Amino acid sequence: MQKKAKLILTEAKEAFEKSPTTKLLYDLKVKYLGKQGLFSELMKGLGKLSKEDRPQVGKEVNIVKNELESAYQVRLQQLDDLEMNKKLQTEHLDLTLPGPDAPRGNQHPLTQTMQEIVGILSKIGFTVRTGPLIETDWYNFEALNIPKDHPARDMQDTFYIDDTHVLRTHTSPVQIHTMQDEKPPIRILSPGSVFRCDADVTHSPNFYQIEGLLIDKDVSMAHLKGTISFFVKQYFGTKIKTRFRPSFFPFTEPSAEVDCSCPQCNGKGCRICSHTGWIEIGGSGLVHPNVIKSAGLDSDEFTGYAFGFGVERMAMIKYGVDDIRLFNENDVRFLGQFN
Ligand code: PHE
């Protein structure tokens, strides 16, 4: 048996040596060393030997088998080296070629819109101030001159957390926080999430507003109009006009709704502006004396204006988006267009 093993070894070694490729070498490995290979076949003969002879013969045959395995490894290394050298000589790698394109994300259109609005108004001295998303009834309503049972509470369908806490329905409570913390003159912007129990093509239960507040002495509607007209021209384009419509908010007096001429059709009338040529972008007015008082400031000394714009609305108008839900669906085909 040992002799037979040696014969196989000599034959296999020679075959390995002659094998020109790793692929053929592998086939030879299977032939000699595989589970059904010649060596395994030979090992079956061990069972026919006497108990005394078996260990010694087995040991010797194993040594031969190990020798064959290392012969295989040596040849494999040789062939690998040869194949690599050949590749290096024939194939050229251009390390200066640009790599494959990695897909790049971009900021969410609403983030971009808020940053753009902040960017414009920061040029005229506004700084950013944020407030909590969960407010007490007092900050969200009462301090803003909306007493309990006031019909104005119905203007905003509120998510109540408990008897005294709500998810803020607008960014206006930040007006109160700011007046409590800072001394006039105050000039702040407050972008952020707000919540209302409302959902359709143009309303989302969670949307964004950007609040503006200026508190100083002798502030008038003219200041408010000047600021908003400046902003609209900067944001939508110099041709876009601003219009103020008398309105009502409990926290401003007088109050005005702000419209701009439709940037999609230049005021001619289209689907985006419901064929009126004008689009509403938010509410505004002079801060009600009760609001200034409830924040702890002297309403005889200080006056101010405030405005609140819908961020989705601004983006929809500027880019001609007709469904507010697109902003929350996270579809990269939509989001990627704002790159
Ligand atoms: N808070 C009002 C709203 O959400 C908007 C507004 C802000 C109006 C500031 C006037 C002044 O509808």
Image (tube, rainbow, N blue to C red):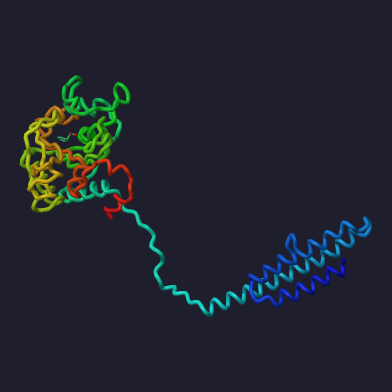
User: Residue drawn 25% across and 33% down?
Assistant: 199
Residue 97, image x and y in percent? 40, 71
Residue 130, image x and y in percent? 26, 39
Residue 274, image x and y in percent? 12, 41
Label tally: 0
User: Residue drawn 73% across and 66% down?
Assistant: 31
Residue 107, image x and y in percent? 30, 51
User: Residue drawn 78% across and 61% down?
Assistant: 40
Q: Is residue 186 left or right of residue 330?
A: left
Q: Locate residue 79: give its quadrant.
A: bottom right
Q: Quadrant of the N terminus?
A: bottom right
Of residues 128 and 195, the one drawn nearer to the viewer in this rendering:
195
Quadrant hosting ligand 1: top left
Is 196 above or below relative to 3? above
Is 92 above or below relative to 227? below
Q: Is residue 256 left or right of residue 153?
A: left
Of residues 70 and 186, the one drawn nearer to the viewer in this rendering:
70
User: Residue drawn 75% across and 61% down?
Assistant: 36
Of residues 207 and 58, the one drawn nearer to the viewer in this rendering:
58
Q: Quadrant of the C terminus?
A: bottom left
Q: Locate residue 45: give its quadrant.
A: bottom right
Q: Is residue 135 left or right of residue 99?
A: left
Of residues 258 and 90, the one drawn nearer to the viewer in this rendering:
90
The single residue placed furthest to the top in the displayed view is 149
